[in-house]
């Protein structure tokens, strides 16, 4: 049986998208819904009832028996509660299938059972999910059958945001309002809406599931807490963009098919740098839709892997010594009539509107570097940032030769008079075509790089939602636009004022521009000289959320209240401590129950070997056995001592009150004890007989897929 399918035929078939709504909804209802989506008008219950009925009928045709409000609490994953469409049985024993507008618009999950950072006490249980009509509903088909999933926001009974979606939508409104202000000053009277567009690239590892299930560290924490490097890692650069192995290709084919049915435009797939590492990238979508789609991508990558006897690892650093995984957040801002505000045009030095937008973004990044760094803070990211092709923890902006030269002109002479142009690339082979190079190269070490008509924020971790990074980006750029508009709207001579403001912003914030090697020690010293923050740890990044300038920006546009920010800070500290605590307990469990007993068996066998050989031949050379016995015994004792120490400090950490002090303790004390245990264990792995070692090695995991 052929498994051929036409992408165009299946794309979006499980999505209640605009085409479906236009076909199924009465024209009046369809028009009202679009007014809600595009103009922010309120959706009346009568209209909602009609939409809900048609949505239910469409979902039932797809085999759905249940619906769920699909939301994104502060757990790092999505959440859902399923309700069937059936109502109370009728007198004849049959049931009706119904779905009301009220059920579509509002749900009531328990708000006390999700992280709230003190916003909700345990006895204050009520919370609400509210339909985000700008992100289409979809039917998810899996082993549970078919379920209608309705993207929603999640807030408490008292109105505080308890999720990622609510502040994201608020930030999108903020940048829309301020970008329109700026466009009106430049004479644009036709654009009605400005939307941040996002294309998040997703990196991930794939390992054999049977081997994965033999590693408790992978099961409980998502990363290997022990593991010696194999003879070969990624040093030959032969995996990157290499031919995709058939087993992985079959998996990718099924992932794409699932995503295309859900309307997710999976575009690019390839092998990444590390063995067993891969990447999937979608086409751009509106910010909130892109965030929802990325959650679907992560869920689909994990779900489909199981069908192929594989396991998808989304942790930022599942294996020490090879590349970690990130999620490059490609961000741009576009009008409803197709104008990309980050398109420099052929002659950027003459594109005054673009230069105003660009220098506003430089201002935003410079003034809120610590906050943007915090938006990518994650326990796993602490292992990744600054090594193996991940950007450094220093926030800088790469503009490339062309725009960098324009900024230098503005700073040095007060005016930009020319733009560098791309040259012809000559390959030296007559049969190959010559073509024009781009005016600028790319910089893979930059955390925030301009790449033609967008910025690529490369700090975000692979398992994180991209919501937080985009909330921050949208808000700080909205603030910069607002500040510029406040000045320009009062100017008597707009042309003169806008040129002066561009020069001022370029000069005041040029320090954040860096086009060089972000991995070099020289850059670390130079960044310190420039006054740029170098925040290496999640624990040190967290306070940026409640810095006065952060609170002021968020409150100005209603994205977060100070109480919401404070709650998120508490959740972040708690998450850090709990994550390290789980890792420490897993190390204790694995070392105490698997590794040390296995090493004892091996040492015992060495001792028996020494005695046996001595008994058989008193003059035999047993230096190899005794050498191994001595070395293994010393490492075994070191491991046991380190295990005892880890048990002590982990127990002490569990007694501490949740908050910053506990997070700092886990980072500085518990994590150090974990490193001290790993060192002798990894050395023992290189000595102990493979048949005795109790778990698959790195080589087994990343090369035998």
Image (tube, rainbow, N blue to C red):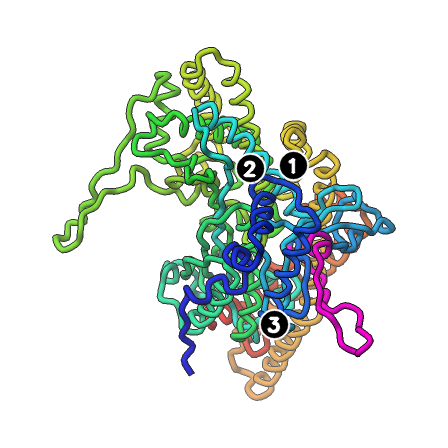
Q: Please report whichever mark, 3 or 2, sits nearer to the chain's N-terminal start.
A: 3
Please name the residue that numbered disc 2 is placed on: 474
The first of marks 1 and 3 along the sequence is 3
Q: Residue at x 42, y 40 (%)?
A: 338
Q: CA distance from mark 1 to mark 2?
A: 10 Å
Q: Which mark is residue 420?
A: none
Is the C-beta separation of discs 1 and 2 under 8 Å?
yes
* Residue holding disc 3: 63
- Residue 84 is one of the magenta-drawn residues: yes
Q: Can residue 642 be seen in this snapshot?
A: no
Q: Residue furthest top?
A: 492
User: What are the residue bounds of the magenta stretch?
Assistant: 77-106
Secondary structure beneath dot 2 equals: helix
Question: Count the marks: how many?
Answer: 3
Q: Quadrant of the N terminus?
A: bottom left
Query: Is 237 above or below relative to 699?
Result: above
């Amino acid at each position: 049986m052929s498994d051929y399918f036409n992408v165009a035929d299946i794309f979006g078939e499980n999505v209640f998208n605009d085409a479906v709504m236009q076909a199924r909804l009465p024209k009046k209802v369809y028009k009202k819904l679009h007014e809600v989506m595009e103009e922010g008008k309120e959706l009346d219950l009568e209209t909602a009832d009609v939409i809900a009925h048609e949505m239910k009928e469409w979902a039932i045709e797809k085999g759905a028996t249940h619906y769920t409000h699909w939301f994104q609490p502060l757990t790092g994953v999505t959440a859902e509660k399923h309700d069937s469409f059936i109502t109370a049985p009728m007198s004849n024993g049959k049931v009706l299938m119904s779905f009301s507008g009220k059920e579509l618009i509002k749900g009531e999950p328990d708000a006390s059972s999700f992280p709230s950072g003190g916003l909700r006490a345990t006895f204050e249980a009520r919370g609400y999910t509210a339909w985000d009509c700008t992100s289409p509903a979809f039917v998810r088909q899996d082993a549970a059958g078919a379920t209608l999933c309705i993207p929603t926001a999640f807030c408490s009974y008292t109105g505080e945001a308890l999720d990622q979606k609510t502040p994201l939508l608020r930030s999108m409104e903020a940048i829309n309002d301020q970008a329109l202000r700026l466009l009106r000053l430049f004479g644009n009277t036709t654009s009605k809406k400005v939307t941040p567009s996002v294309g998040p690239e997703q990196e991930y590892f794939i390992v054999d599931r049977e081997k994965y299930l033999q590693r408790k560290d992978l099961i409980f924490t998502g990363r290997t807490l022990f593991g010696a490097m194999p003879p070969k890692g990624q040093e030959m650069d032969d995996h990157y963009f290499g031919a995709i192995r058939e087993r992985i290709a079959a998996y990718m084919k099924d992932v794409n098919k699932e995503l295309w049915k859900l309307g997710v435009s999976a575009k690019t797939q390839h092998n990444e740098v590390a063995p067993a590492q891969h990447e999937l990238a979608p086409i751009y979508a509106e910010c909130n839709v892109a965030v929802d789609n990325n959650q679907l991508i992560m869920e689909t990558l994990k779900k489909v892997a199981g069908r192929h006897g594989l396991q998808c690892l989304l942790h930022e650093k599942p294996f020490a010594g090879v590349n970690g995984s990130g999620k490059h957040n490609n961000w741009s801002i576009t009008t409803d009539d197709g104008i990309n505000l980050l398109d420099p045009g052929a002659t950027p030095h003459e594109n005054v509107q673009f230069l105003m937008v660009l220098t506003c973004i430089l201002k935003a990044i410079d003034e809120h570097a610590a906050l943007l760094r915090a938006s990518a803070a994650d326990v796993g990211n602490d292992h990744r940032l600054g090594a193996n092709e991940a950007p450094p923890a220093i926030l800088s902006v790469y503009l490339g030769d062309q725009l960098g030269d324009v900024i230098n002109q503005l700073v040095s002479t007060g005016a930009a008079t020319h733009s560098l142009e791309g040259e012809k690339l000559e390959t030296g082979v007559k049969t190959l075509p010559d073509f024009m190079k781009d005016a600028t190269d790319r910089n893979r070490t930059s955390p925030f790089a301009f790449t033609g008509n967008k910025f690529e924020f490369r700090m975000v971790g692979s398992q994180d939602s991209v919501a937080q990074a985009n909330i921050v980006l949208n808000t700080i750029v909205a603030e910069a636009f607002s500040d510029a508009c406040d000045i320009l709207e009062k100017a008597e001579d707009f042309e003169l004022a806008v040129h002066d403001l561009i020069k001022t912003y370029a000069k005041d914030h040029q320090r954040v521009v860096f086009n060089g090697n972000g991995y070099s020690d020289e850059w670390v010293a130079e960044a310190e000289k420039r006054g740029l923050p170098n925040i290496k740890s999640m624990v040190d990044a967290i306070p940026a959320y409640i810095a006065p300038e952060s609170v002021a920006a968020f409150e100005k546009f209603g994205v977060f209240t100070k109480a919401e920010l404070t709650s998120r800070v508490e959740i972040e500290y708690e998450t850090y401590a709990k994550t390290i605590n789980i890792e420490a307990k897993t190390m204790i469990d694995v070392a105490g129950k698997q590794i040390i007993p296995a090493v004892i068996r091996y040492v015992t066998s060495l001792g028996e070997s020494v005695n046996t050989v001595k008994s058989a031949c008193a003059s035999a050379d047993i230096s190899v056995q005794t050498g191994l016995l001595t070395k293994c015994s010393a490492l075994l004792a070191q491991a046991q001592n380190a295990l005892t120490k880890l048990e002590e400090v982990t127990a002490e950490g569990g007694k501490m009150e949740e908050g910053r002090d506990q997070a700092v303790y886990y980072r500085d004390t518990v994590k150090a004890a974990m490193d001290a245990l790993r060192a002798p264990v990894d050395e023992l792995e290189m000595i102990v007989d493979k048949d005795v070692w109790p778990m698959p090695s790195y080589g087994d995991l990343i090369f035998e897929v």
